[in-house]
Amino acid sequence: MYWNRKIECMPREELKELQFTRLKTLVDNLYSNNRFYHDKMKAAGVLPGDLTRMEDISKLPFMHKQDLRDNYPAGMFTVPATDMVRYHVSSGTTGKPTLVGYTKNDLDYWTEALARSLTSIGITADDTMQVSYGYGLFTGGLGLHYGAERVGATVLPSGTGSTERQLELMIDLGVTAIACTPSYMIHMIDVADRIGVDFRRDTKLRRAVLGAEPWTEGMRQRIESRAGIQAYDIYGTSEMAGPMFTECEERKGIHVSGDLAYVEIIDPETGESLGPGQKGEMVVTMLTKEAMPLIRYRIRDLTTLMDEECECGRTSPRIERISGRSDDMLIIRGINVFPSQIEYTLMRIPEVGDQYMILVDREGALDTLTIQVEIRNEAFSDRVEDMISLKRRIESEIKKYLNIGANVELKDQGSLPRFEGKAKRVVDRRIMT
Ligand code: DLL
């Protein structure tokens, strides 16, 4: 039920004290020993002594991805190279790669976070978990690998690709849980359909731990009904360590272990703090990281903090499913469009399959939005009028929900690109030209 009951169910007041003690130690240490943090705090006119309670964290300046880039490769590291035990490199959802370093303790806390998360969704020593995230520089593979091993599960480190072989191993080894991106899960289900594998009949798969990219509730329902499994959202970023936090079995938001990470939500425009229930940009402070600390790091993911305690008994703060990144937002003819809103709309239309692409172009001075959607085989009709009316219906749903005109192209099932790692469903050709 719990991996670390004492911490996971710690009364909120006690947790706040622990957070503040850790923050204080971190800030004192960085101010005295690290040039980057020292200069940054000085420039903001704040001294370690100005922090007297957790809320004072808002006096500290923000950190940005650009800080990591400007100080590449080792400028953000706060321990000597001999204390470093691993590097990961993020290809980055946007822009240049980010290098992350870990001490032994960093790896230990990361794995602890994952052990708590996996336990909270019912993964135990009885499970066999297929880790189909990329192994290597990406944090997904090795992160989940060590997390699953720590709870005593048997790990099948299959990585990405060779999907038919992955399905064969899943069947032969009685795999009960899988970790991969939601888009790869959909791809696996498609391949299984094509080669005549029925997840319910032929596999023992019960749970999927899906993340590393935005996905919607509608996509979850499709994955669950097609594969007969429970799918859980997992979140994290390389800068934080990698994948770390999941929903619990209640599936009402992602639990963020408060002893390890302190989350704030701010208005992306003004930087003002927002209260629970208000959607904004996530800012994270990692309270235990040694090799590459993060203080008030602007992750750019958009979410909402949920204040009330969860029925599962864990007192840790929760965040809602990530709805996108502030820098993911497309501005099309002046209208703000998040790709997740498009997915949300498409997944409610039964004829629409699970794959889509979003193409943005500029014709003259005008932006155009084209949405290519796969249509289920059963929904295809020989009658041209039926297909035109389906196309019009999808376009009108998009118009209704997003208030923007789009040209919808209907595609055969299996014809759009598939993704093994993070899906790249948006092609903004305005940038390329
Ligand atoms: O994607 C770490 C990870 C691996 C998370 C495996 C979950 C599972 P990065 O490559 O640094 O790290 O990308 C981090 O991916 O800022 C979000 O924009 C996005 N992201 C990650 N998880 C989710 C999720 C890993 N569950 C960036 N929902 C983040 C939505 C997610 N977006």
Image: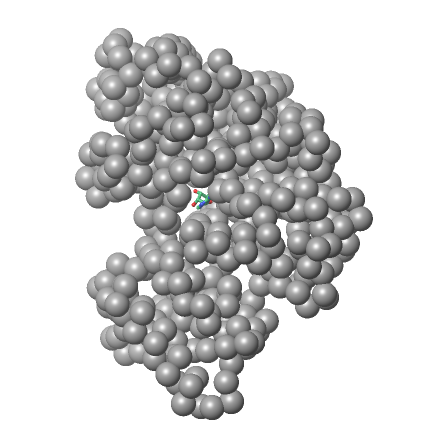
**Residue 310 shows in the view:** yes
In the image shown, does 382 or 211 lie closer to the viewer?
382
**Residue at (53, 73) in percent of width and height:** 376
Residue at image location 51% in from the left, 89% down from the top: 382
The image shows residue 370, relative to residue 292, as above or below, that is below
Look at the image and tell me in which quarter the C terminus lies.
Answer: bottom left
Can you say whether 209 is above or below 379 in the image? above
x 49%, y 13%: residue: 6
Residue 350 appears at what percent x and percent y?
45, 68
Position of the N terminus by quadrant: top right
302 vs 341: above or below: above
Residue 184 shows in this picture: no
Image location of residue 298, percent across then percent down: 34, 36
Residue 198 as seen in the image, left or right of residue 66 = right
Give percent across and percent down for residue 395: 33, 74
Tell me where residue 67 sits by quadrant.
top left
Q: How many marks?
A: 0
Q: How is the image coloured?
A: one colour
Q: Residue furthest right?
A: 172
> Which of the 4 image quadrants contains residue 414?
bottom right
Q: Going 55% across and 49% down the picture, which residue do you hit?
A: 181
Quick check: 403 left or right of 361? left
Name the side, left or right, on which 64 lies relative to 410. left
Q: 242 or 387: nearer the eye?
A: 387
Q: Nearer the viewer, residue 308 or 298?
A: 308
Residue 86 coordinates in the image, percent (x, y)? 62, 29
Is residue 272 rendered to the left or right of residue 209?
left
